[in-house]
Image: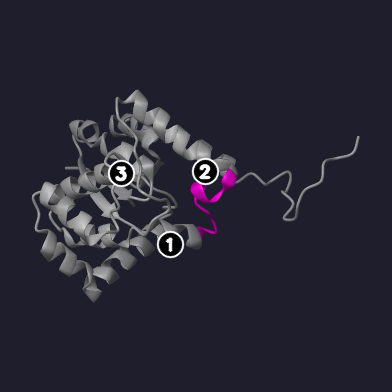
Amino acid sequence: METVRFYFDPISPFFWLATKQIGRIEAAGVQVEMQPVLFAAMLTAHGLVGPAEVPAKRELTFRDAMRLADAQGLTFVGPPGHPFNPLLPLRMSIAVTNREARIRFATEIAATTWERGEDVSNPDVMREVARRADLDGDALLAAASEPQVKQALALATEAAIQGGIFGVPSFVYQGELFWGADRVDSLLRRIAGHRIDEARLQDFLARPPLAQRAKSAPTLPQQ
Protein backbone atom coordinates (compact mmCIF):
# COMPACT_ATOMS: atom_id res chain seq x y z
CA MET A 1 0.00 0.00 0.00
CA GLU A 2 1.18 3.52 -0.81
CA THR A 3 2.32 5.67 2.10
CA VAL A 4 1.86 9.30 3.10
CA ARG A 5 4.56 10.43 5.49
CA PHE A 6 3.25 12.99 7.96
CA TYR A 7 6.02 15.14 9.51
CA PHE A 8 5.04 16.70 12.81
CA ASP A 9 6.10 18.67 15.86
CA PRO A 10 3.49 19.50 18.56
CA ILE A 11 4.77 23.10 18.62
CA SER A 12 2.42 23.83 15.71
CA PRO A 13 -1.34 24.22 16.17
CA PHE A 14 -1.71 23.24 12.53
CA PHE A 15 -0.29 19.82 13.37
CA TRP A 16 -3.23 19.41 15.74
CA LEU A 17 -5.69 20.39 13.02
CA ALA A 18 -4.00 18.03 10.56
CA THR A 19 -4.41 15.05 12.89
CA LYS A 20 -8.16 15.46 12.46
CA GLN A 21 -7.69 14.66 8.75
CA ILE A 22 -5.81 11.37 9.09
CA GLY A 23 -9.00 9.36 8.62
CA ARG A 24 -9.78 11.19 5.37
CA ILE A 25 -6.28 10.58 4.08
CA GLU A 26 -6.31 6.87 4.85
CA ALA A 27 -9.81 6.56 3.36
CA ALA A 28 -8.14 7.44 0.03
CA GLY A 29 -6.37 4.07 0.12
CA VAL A 30 -3.00 5.00 1.61
CA GLN A 31 -1.29 4.46 4.95
CA VAL A 32 -0.19 7.42 7.07
CA GLU A 33 3.20 7.17 8.73
CA MET A 34 3.81 9.74 11.45
CA GLN A 35 7.35 11.13 11.49
CA PRO A 36 8.41 13.22 14.51
CA VAL A 37 10.87 16.01 13.63
CA LEU A 38 12.24 19.03 15.48
CA PHE A 39 10.80 22.12 13.79
CA ALA A 40 13.33 24.45 15.44
CA ALA A 41 16.20 22.57 13.78
CA MET A 42 14.49 22.92 10.41
CA LEU A 43 14.15 26.66 10.87
CA THR A 44 17.84 26.97 11.70
CA ALA A 45 18.91 24.80 8.77
CA HIS A 46 16.84 26.78 6.26
CA GLY A 47 17.64 30.22 7.71
CA LEU A 48 14.05 30.84 8.76
CA VAL A 49 12.19 31.92 11.88
CA GLY A 50 8.92 30.51 13.12
CA PRO A 51 5.74 32.50 12.44
CA ALA A 52 5.22 32.98 16.18
CA GLU A 53 8.69 34.58 16.37
CA VAL A 54 7.61 37.40 14.03
CA PRO A 55 5.53 39.91 16.04
CA ALA A 56 3.47 40.89 12.99
CA LYS A 57 2.61 37.23 12.34
CA ARG A 58 2.22 35.84 15.85
CA GLU A 59 -1.33 37.01 16.50
CA LEU A 60 -2.46 36.11 12.99
CA THR A 61 -0.98 32.61 13.28
CA PHE A 62 -3.09 31.77 16.31
CA ARG A 63 -6.11 33.74 15.10
CA ASP A 64 -6.00 31.67 11.91
CA ALA A 65 -5.65 28.44 13.88
CA MET A 66 -8.72 29.41 15.89
CA ARG A 67 -10.66 30.20 12.71
CA LEU A 68 -9.81 26.82 11.20
CA ALA A 69 -10.60 25.03 14.45
CA ASP A 70 -13.98 26.75 14.69
CA ALA A 71 -14.77 25.74 11.11
CA GLN A 72 -14.21 22.11 12.15
CA GLY A 73 -16.26 22.42 15.32
CA LEU A 74 -13.15 22.29 17.50
CA THR A 75 -12.24 24.42 20.49
CA PHE A 76 -8.77 25.95 20.56
CA VAL A 77 -7.29 26.22 24.07
CA GLY A 78 -3.54 26.13 23.50
CA PRO A 79 -0.65 25.27 25.83
CA PRO A 80 0.21 27.24 28.99
CA GLY A 81 2.91 29.11 27.07
CA HIS A 82 4.28 29.24 23.55
CA PRO A 83 6.80 28.38 22.33
CA PHE A 84 7.55 25.41 24.56
CA ASN A 85 10.14 22.63 24.48
CA PRO A 86 8.75 19.73 22.37
CA LEU A 87 11.70 17.35 22.75
CA LEU A 88 10.09 15.04 25.31
CA PRO A 89 6.93 14.28 23.27
CA LEU A 90 9.00 14.01 20.08
CA ARG A 91 11.46 11.55 21.61
CA MET A 92 8.66 9.52 23.15
CA SER A 93 6.97 9.43 19.75
CA ILE A 94 10.16 8.16 18.11
CA ALA A 95 10.24 5.38 20.69
CA VAL A 96 6.79 4.19 19.57
CA THR A 97 7.67 1.95 16.64
CA ASN A 98 4.25 0.53 15.77
CA ARG A 99 2.63 2.61 13.00
CA GLU A 100 -0.91 2.62 14.37
CA ALA A 101 0.23 3.16 17.95
CA ARG A 102 2.32 6.14 16.87
CA ILE A 103 -0.72 7.65 15.15
CA ARG A 104 -2.73 7.25 18.36
CA PHE A 105 0.05 8.71 20.44
CA ALA A 106 0.71 11.69 18.16
CA THR A 107 -3.00 12.44 17.91
CA GLU A 108 -3.29 12.39 21.69
CA ILE A 109 -0.27 14.69 22.04
CA ALA A 110 -1.95 17.14 19.67
CA ALA A 111 -5.25 17.09 21.52
CA THR A 112 -3.56 17.38 24.92
CA THR A 113 -1.59 20.43 23.80
CA TRP A 114 -4.13 22.36 21.78
CA GLU A 115 -7.55 21.18 23.06
CA ARG A 116 -6.82 20.48 26.72
CA GLY A 117 -4.21 23.19 27.14
CA GLU A 118 -1.69 21.01 28.98
CA ASP A 119 2.10 21.24 29.02
CA VAL A 120 3.45 18.25 27.09
CA SER A 121 7.00 19.09 28.17
CA ASN A 122 5.92 17.85 31.63
CA PRO A 123 6.71 14.14 32.20
CA ASP A 124 3.57 13.63 34.30
CA VAL A 125 1.41 15.01 31.50
CA MET A 126 3.15 12.79 28.96
CA ARG A 127 2.68 9.74 31.16
CA GLU A 128 -1.07 10.42 31.04
CA VAL A 129 -0.95 11.04 27.29
CA ALA A 130 0.59 7.60 26.85
CA ARG A 131 -2.07 6.02 29.05
CA ARG A 132 -4.86 7.58 26.98
CA ALA A 133 -3.16 6.15 23.86
CA ASP A 134 -3.03 2.68 25.48
CA LEU A 135 0.75 2.79 25.82
CA ASP A 136 3.21 2.36 28.70
CA GLY A 137 4.09 5.88 29.78
CA ASP A 138 6.86 4.88 32.16
CA ALA A 139 8.57 2.82 29.48
CA LEU A 140 8.32 5.63 26.93
CA LEU A 141 9.62 8.21 29.40
CA ALA A 142 12.61 5.98 30.08
CA ALA A 143 13.17 5.44 26.36
CA ALA A 144 13.14 9.20 25.72
CA SER A 145 16.34 9.50 27.75
CA GLU A 146 18.20 6.83 25.82
CA PRO A 147 20.99 8.05 23.49
CA GLN A 148 19.75 5.94 20.57
CA VAL A 149 16.29 7.48 20.79
CA LYS A 150 17.70 11.01 20.92
CA GLN A 151 19.89 10.18 17.93
CA ALA A 152 16.93 8.71 16.04
CA LEU A 153 15.06 12.01 16.35
CA ALA A 154 18.13 13.98 15.24
CA LEU A 155 18.67 11.70 12.25
CA ALA A 156 14.99 11.84 11.26
CA THR A 157 15.07 15.62 11.42
CA GLU A 158 18.26 15.82 9.36
CA ALA A 159 16.82 13.44 6.75
CA ALA A 160 13.70 15.61 6.52
CA ILE A 161 15.82 18.74 6.08
CA GLN A 162 17.84 17.07 3.34
CA GLY A 163 14.57 16.05 1.72
CA GLY A 164 13.43 19.67 1.53
CA ILE A 165 11.04 19.67 4.48
CA PHE A 166 11.01 23.12 6.11
CA GLY A 167 7.78 23.26 8.08
CA VAL A 168 5.18 21.27 10.00
CA PRO A 169 2.85 19.70 9.40
CA SER A 170 4.15 18.41 6.09
CA PHE A 171 2.97 15.46 4.03
CA VAL A 172 5.02 13.62 1.42
CA TYR A 173 3.39 11.34 -1.12
CA GLN A 174 5.43 9.73 -3.90
CA GLY A 175 8.17 12.27 -3.27
CA GLU A 176 5.86 15.30 -3.54
CA LEU A 177 5.57 17.71 -0.62
CA PHE A 178 2.33 19.18 0.71
CA TRP A 179 2.90 21.70 3.50
CA GLY A 180 0.22 22.70 5.99
CA ALA A 181 -3.04 21.39 7.39
CA ASP A 182 -4.86 23.35 4.69
CA ARG A 183 -3.17 21.30 1.94
CA VAL A 184 -4.94 18.04 2.72
CA ASP A 185 -7.43 18.54 -0.13
CA SER A 186 -4.52 19.05 -2.54
CA LEU A 187 -2.90 15.90 -1.18
CA LEU A 188 -6.12 13.94 -1.71
CA ARG A 189 -6.36 15.17 -5.29
CA ARG A 190 -2.79 14.00 -5.88
CA ILE A 191 -3.56 10.59 -4.40
CA ALA A 192 -6.56 10.42 -6.76
CA GLY A 193 -4.22 10.90 -9.71
CA HIS A 194 -4.34 14.62 -10.40
CA ARG A 195 -0.88 16.03 -11.13
CA ILE A 196 0.51 19.38 -12.13
CA ASP A 197 2.55 19.80 -15.31
CA GLU A 198 6.04 19.10 -13.94
CA ALA A 199 7.77 20.21 -17.14
CA ARG A 200 6.01 23.56 -16.98
CA LEU A 201 7.00 23.97 -13.32
CA GLN A 202 10.67 23.25 -14.05
CA ASP A 203 10.60 25.64 -16.98
CA PHE A 204 9.27 28.39 -14.73
CA LEU A 205 11.77 27.68 -11.95
CA ALA A 206 14.62 27.95 -14.44
CA ARG A 207 13.69 31.52 -15.38
CA PRO A 208 16.09 34.16 -14.05
CA PRO A 209 15.05 36.71 -11.41
CA LEU A 210 14.21 40.14 -12.80
CA ALA A 211 14.79 41.92 -9.49
CA GLN A 212 16.51 41.33 -6.18
CA ARG A 213 15.23 42.25 -2.72
CA ALA A 214 17.58 44.53 -0.83
CA LYS A 215 19.24 42.88 2.17
CA SER A 216 19.21 46.10 4.19
CA ALA A 217 16.15 48.12 5.13
CA PRO A 218 14.48 49.18 1.88
CA THR A 219 13.65 52.73 0.98
CA LEU A 220 10.60 53.70 -0.99
CA PRO A 221 11.29 54.73 -4.57
CA GLN A 222 11.15 58.47 -5.19
CA GLN A 223 8.77 59.69 -7.85
Residue 177 placement, left or right of 116:
right
User: Residue placed at 45% from the left, 33% from the top?
Assistant: 64
Mark 2 vs mark 1: which is more N-terminal? 1
Label 3 to label 1: alpha-carbon separation: 24 Å
Residue 216 placement, left or right of 15:
right
Badge 1 local density, few (<14 within 10 Å), some, or many (20+)? some
Viewer-side residue, 102 vs 62: 62
Q: Secondary structure at mark 2?
A: helix
Mark 3 vs mark 2: which is more N-terminal? 2
Label 2 to label 1: alpha-carbon separation: 19 Å
User: Residue placed at 45% from the left, 38% from the top?
Assistant: 62
Q: Which residues are magenta?
A: 46-55
Residue 158 lies in quadrant: bottom left
Label 3 to label 2: alpha-carbon separation: 18 Å
Residue 131 placement, left or right of 47:
left
In the rendered image, which residue does mark 1 sit on? Answer: 41
Q: Amino acid at mark 2?
A: Arg
Q: Secondary structure at mark 1?
A: helix
On the image, the x and y values in percent for residue 188 come to 30, 31
User: Residue placed at 74% from the left, 52% from the top?
Assistant: 214
Q: Closer to us: mark 3 or mark 1?
A: 3
Badge 3 local density, few (<14 within 10 Å), some, or many (20+)? some
Mark 3 vs mark 1: which is more N-terminal? 1
In the rendered image, which residue does mark 2 sit on? Answer: 58
On the image, the x and y values in percent for residue 4 come to 26, 44
In the rendered image, which residue does mark 3 sit on? Answer: 117
